């Protein structure tokens, strides 16, 4: 239920942005990616405390400080790369915004999955 509320709030926040063009929508999508990445890291950390092992091969093992730094760095790197691409190819604004909302949705699914993990024996 919490995820539905978060997604609805993100959708409401994005509605006025359509009048501002795709650049504004892309910025809102980047905020959504950052927020859901933080949520994914938090729930992964909690699942790791319950004995779960990270499924992502880049962040293999129990989720901890190292994996948090890797995921945060990957998200920051993605955003920097987007800024560079947008500077040279502004016509890709719409595609990047849609891809970011897709990534935010994927992270939202991971938040739900991680929060459903029970203690592993």
Image (cartoon, rainbow, N blue to C red):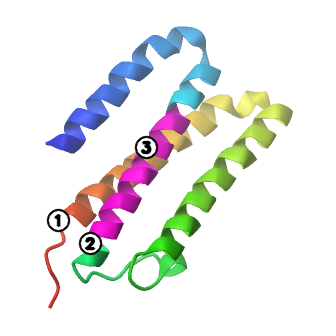
Near mark 3 (Cα within 10 A), the count class, few <14, some 14-19 or many ≥20, is some
User: In this rendering, is residue 37 above or below 96?
Assistant: below
- Residue drawn at x 50%, y 77% is 59
Q: Using the rendered view, name the quadrant where residue 83 is placed.
A: top right
The secondary structure that most of the magenta stretch takes on is helix
Say left or right for 1 vs 18. left
Q: Which mark is residue 116?
A: 1
Between discs 2 and 3, the one toward the N terminus: 3
Question: Where does residue 64 sit, x and y in percent of width and height?
Answer: 43, 75
Residue ID for mark 3: 35
Question: Which numbered disc flags the more N-terminal residue, 3 or 1?
Answer: 3
Q: Residue at x 76, y 34 (%)?
A: 86
For marks 3 and 1, give the one nearer the viewer. Answer: 3
Of the numbered discs 1 and 2, the one sitting upstream in the chain is 2
Horizontal relation, residue 23 to residue 44: left or right: right
Q: Residue at x 47, y 83 (%)?
A: 60
Q: Residue at x 61, y 30 (%)?
A: 94
Read off the magenta span.
Answer: 29-47
Q: Secondary structure at mark 2?
A: helix
CA distance separating discs 3 and 1? 19 Å
Pick out the residue farthest to the right: 88
């Amino acid at each position: 239920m919490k995820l539905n509320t978060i997604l609805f709030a993100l959708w409401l926040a994005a509605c006025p942005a359509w009048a501002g063009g795709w650049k504004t929508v892309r910025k809102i999508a980047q905020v959504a990616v950052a927020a859901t990445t933080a949520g994914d890291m938090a729930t992964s950390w909690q699942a790791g405390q319950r004995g779960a092992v990270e499924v992502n091969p880049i962040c293999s093992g129990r989720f901890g400080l190292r994996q948090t730094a890797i995921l945060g760095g990957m998200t920051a790197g993605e955003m920097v790369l987007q800024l560079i691409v947008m500077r040279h190819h502004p016509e890709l604004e719409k595609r990047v915004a849609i891809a970011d909302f897709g990534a935010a949705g994927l992270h939202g699914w991971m938040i739900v999955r991680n929060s459903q993990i029970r203690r592993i024996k």
